[in-house]
């Protein structure tokens, strides 16, 4: 293969493009036949600069394909790939790609999830009075620990907004950085968990998330402490709104009401026989 002075081989082009696009937490594999894989160095939250990604792909002659931004990824997983389309690549075109990457910062990165101190508050008079057995703490704790965080406090509260608010304050004082409240978030008269959260002075970011299952969820902020009202379906559904919100809160990546509203596009769980979340469209906002 003879290259002109203004051309480079597809492998060299793919190597330079991937180096320009890769950020922290990314390991590169390749190039091979003009293709490079982006691999997660550690478990964490995948972040994609979607706007810059579109600009790169619109330039032509190169493709950059990724998983959805804000997906939880495991160590060693392929999270993106790039390929130079022609066998020989114009240096001027490569310069445009690299310039776009420099302007926007890393296109693809993985945020390591820090270990957070978590409190779980189960609400509901029937559970508080031991008339029925709670099943939510075990489910939530398993999800918390799977992401490397630790449950440091557990508590129960009846359907009493003042009591619920008091337990949340105790958890905050005890050092809980994230507080998960389960139960009492529907529209029944005795469902007062939302009122209890409000009584703490917390700022409600959203009540109601446009995904199914998990629509009856709350996300709030009390100073630097995040409060997540987990939906009742967390007990029996493998994936709910809690799985969308919790990793983001742990990673410290803000979630705006506008973004939450976008989750409705793709927010209907397919109820697959074998759940493959997060490798699915659930809650990805289209």
Image: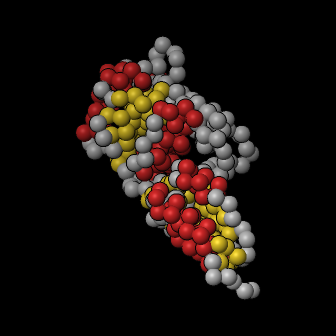
* Residue 229 seen anywhere in this rendered image of the structure: no
- Residue in the picture at 52% in, 60% down: 100
Picture coordinates of residue 108 (x, y %)? 53, 60
**In the picture, which quadrant includes the C terminus?**
top right
Could you tell whether 120 is left or right of 39 in the image? left
Picture coordinates of residue 121 (x, y %)? 40, 35
Q: Decide which of 22, 174 is in the foreground and name it.
A: 22
Residue found at the far top of this picture: 189
Image quadrant where residue 240 sits: top right
Q: How is the image coloured?
A: secondary structure
- Residue in the picture at 42% in, 24% down: 193
Q: Decide which of 283, 35 is in the foreground and name it.
A: 35
Could you tell whether 51 is left or right of 9 in the image? left
- 117 relative to 34, above or below: above
- 275 relative to 168, above or below: below
**In the picture, which quadrant includes the N terminus?**
bottom right
* Residue 280 seen anywhere in this rendered image of the structure: yes
Report the number of discs. Answer: 0
Picture coordinates of residue 19 (x, y %)? 53, 71
- 80 relative to 4, above or below: above
């Amino acid at each position: 293969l003879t290259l002109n002075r203004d051309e480079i081989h597809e492998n060299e082009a793919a190597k330079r493009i991937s180096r320009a696009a890769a950020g922290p937490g990314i390991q590169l594999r390749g190039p091979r036949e003009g293709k490079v894989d982006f691999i997660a160095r550690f478990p964490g939250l995948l972040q994609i600069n979607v706007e810059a990604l579109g600009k790169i792909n619109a330039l032509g002659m190169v493709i950059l394909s990724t998983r959805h931004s804000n997906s939880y990824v495991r160590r060693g997983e392929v999270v993106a790939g790039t390929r130079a389309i022609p066998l020989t690549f114009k240096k001027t075109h490569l310069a445009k790609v690299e310039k776009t990457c420099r302007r926007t910062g890393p296109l693809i990165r993985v945020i390591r999830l820090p270990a957070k101190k978590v409190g779980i508050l189960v609400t509901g008079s029937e559970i508080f009075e031991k008339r029925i057995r709670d099943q939510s703490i075990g489910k939530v704790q398993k999800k918390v620990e799977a992401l490397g965080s630790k449950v440091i406090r557990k508590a129960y509260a009846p359907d009493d907004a003042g009591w619920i608010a008091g337990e949340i304050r105790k958890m905050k004082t005890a050092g809980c950085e994230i507080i998960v409240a389960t139960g009492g978030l529907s529209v029944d008269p005795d469902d007062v968990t939302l009122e209890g959260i409000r009584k703490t002075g917390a700022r409600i970011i959203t009540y109601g998330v446009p995904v199914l299952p998990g629509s009856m969820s709350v996300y709030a902020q009390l100073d630097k402490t995040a409060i997540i009202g987990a939906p009742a379906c967390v007990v029996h559904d493998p994936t709910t709104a809690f799985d969308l919100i919790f990793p983001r809160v742990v990673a410290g990546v803000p979630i705006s009401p506008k973004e939450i509203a976008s989750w409705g596009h793709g927010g209907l769980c397919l109820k697959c026989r074998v759940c493959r979340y997060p490798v699915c469209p659930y809650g990805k906002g289209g």
